[in-house]
Amino acid sequence: MPEFTRAEAEALLPKVRPLLEDLRRRTQSYRSRPSDPVARELEALLREIAALGVEVKDPDQGLVDFRGRYRGRAVYLCWRLGEGSRIAFWHDLDAGFAGRKIIED
């Protein structure tokens, strides 16, 4: 996976956001009515997001991580749908969502 600066990750958000919105809709659709075509669409969306270097953590929330650095440490820059156009949180690579901390400028 590539390593992103905060600015690089934020520059990808306009491309990532609609993919995550589509992923969330299709995931909900698949849960209510599973089908092979929708499963293939989900897999294609996940591959497209991964090809950008972004890790999907929760398709229902639109939660993603960008591998990056914060204060010299390898971390995930964490963002989810509805959080605007800035990435405001980070967490250690092994911490997950519960370990999110605010990025202090």
Image: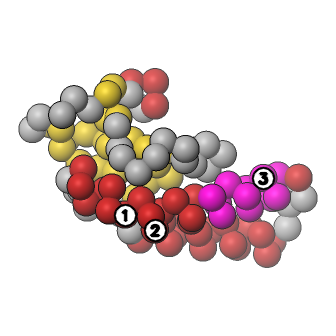
Which residue occupies 22% across, 29% down? 104
Q: Is residue 92 left or right of residue 23?
A: left
Amino acid at dot 3 = Gln
Q: Is residue 78 visible?
A: yes
Mark 1 — residue?
12
- The kind of secondary structure element at disc 2 is helix
Residue 68 in the image, given as x and y percentages of width and height: 23, 48
Q: Are marks 2 and 3 in contact (CB under 8 Å)?
A: no
Mark 2 — residue?
15
Mark 3 — residue?
28
Binning the other alpha carbons within 10 Å of mark 1 as few (below 14), some (14 to 19) or many (20 upward) gives some
- Which residue occupies the extreme right position in the image? 33
> How far is mark 1 from mark 2, CA to CA?
5 Å
> Does 49 sit above or below residue 95?
below
Disc nearer the start of the sequence (2/3):
2
Q: Choose top left, top right, bottom left or bottom right for residue 50.
A: bottom left
Residue 44 in the image, given as x and y percentages of width and height: 60, 73
